[in-house]
């Protein structure tokens, strides 16, 4: 869910324009921000994104355009891919 929040509002997580600089636990914010359906945080969500979730987010637009990563139909795609696309689609 953290990856989805970053995907939905990428401008909020642009390090070049960020004025807060509460990037990680070494410099947490003095307040807690709640993101409905995701959780409460006092650091930036961007460092929490794994390489795998970032990759799936990049593939999501291709999925929406009907382009699949493997030859064949949806049923011939890796299960992890199908599950990730279902989560992102919600």
Image (cartoon, helix red, strand yellow):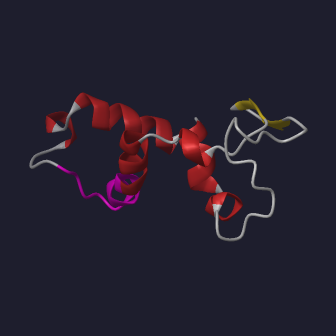
Q: Could one spot residue 7 in this view of the protein?
A: yes
Among the 4 quarters of the image, the one containing residue 52:
top left
- As for residue 64 lying within the magenta part, the answer is yes
Residue 31 horizontal side relative to residue 56, left or right: right
Residue 66 horizontal side relative to residue 22, left or right: left
**Residue at x 33%, y 59% (from the top left corner):** 62
Q: Could one spot residue 85 in this view of the protein?
A: no
Q: Position of residue 58 (x, y in %)?
A: 39, 56
Residue situated in front as seen by the camera: 62 or 42: 42
Q: Is residue 16 above or below residue 59?
A: below
In the current view of this chain or complex, which residue is farthest to the front? 26
Residue situated in front as seen by the camera: 10 or 26: 26
Among the 4 quarters of the image, the one containing residue 28:
top right
**Residue at x 42%, y 48% (from the top left corner):** 54
Residue range of the region highlighted in magenta in the rendering: 59-69
Q: Position of residue 11 (x, y in %)?
A: 67, 65
Residue situated in front as seen by the camera: 8 or 23: 23
- As for residue 19 lying within the magenta part, the answer is no
Q: Position of residue 75 (x, y in %)?
A: 18, 34
The quadrant of the image that shows the C terminus is top right
């Amino acid at each position: 869910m953290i990856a989805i929040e970053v995907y939905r509002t990428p401008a909020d997580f642009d390090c070049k324009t960020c004025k807060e600089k509460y990037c990680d636990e070494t410099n947490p914010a003095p307040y807690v921000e709640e993101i409905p359906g995701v959780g409460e945080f006092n650091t930036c969500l961007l460092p929490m994104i794994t390489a795998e979730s970032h990759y799936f987010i990049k593939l999501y637009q291709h999925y929406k355009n009907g382009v699949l990563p493997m030859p064949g139909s949806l049923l011939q795609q890796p299960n992890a891919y199908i599950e990730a696309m279902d989560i992102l689609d919600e």
